[in-house]
Image (cartoon, rainbow, N blue to C red):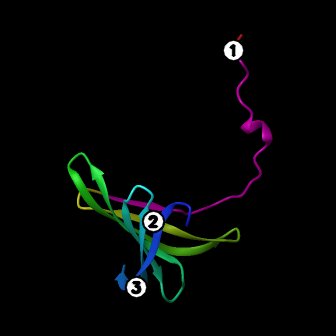
Amino acid sequence: LMRAYREITVSGFAVFDDRQCVELKLTSHTGTVSFLYIDTETYLSGGTKMNVETPIGMVETKTYLRNYRDLGGFITPTEISIESSVQRQLIRIDKVTFDEIPPSEYAPPPAAP
């Protein structure tokens, strides 16, 4: 996280997605500011808030991370909701597998003759 941002500061407490959170202000190396919300009860990420440049101008976008589950030893949100004034997206994770992928799947295709 520290490599991705020039500065991370604690802004204070905030209610985000109806949960009490610590609000972290993240400043990227280019000066872009976003906010990360950490649930004070679970210490898991509740989501983010940032302004995103769109064809119609800057739009505030919030991403909500919900319904955390243990997926193969990884505590993961299984519902990701992305909301702005122009669109809403919902991603739900129902099943995860950790099947081994054979090395041949990563091999580059054969060179053309």
Q: Amino acid at mark 1?
A: Ala
Query: Disc 3, disc 2: CB below 8 Å?
Result: no
Which numbered disc covers residue 19? 3
Q: Is residue 108 visible?
A: yes
Q: Is residue 18 visible?
A: no
Q: Amino acid at mark 3?
A: Arg
In the picture, the quarter occupied by the C terminus is top right
**The magenta stretch spans which residues?**
88-111
What residue did someone put label 2 on? Answer: 80
What residue did someone put label 1 on? Answer: 112
Give the image quarter of residue 105.
Answer: top right
Which numbered disc covers residue 66? none
Q: Measure the alpha-carbon separation of dots 2 and 1.
A: 42 Å
Q: Residue at x 52, y 60 (%)?
A: 4
Magenta span contains residue 110: yes
Question: Relative to 84, is 107 above or below?
Answer: above
Q: Measure the alpha-carbon separation of dots 1 and 3.
A: 56 Å
Question: Relative to 74, is 51 above or below?
Answer: above
Q: Nearer the viewer, residue 65 or 9?
A: 9
Horizontal arrangement in the rendering, residue 34 relative to residue 72 (left or right)? left
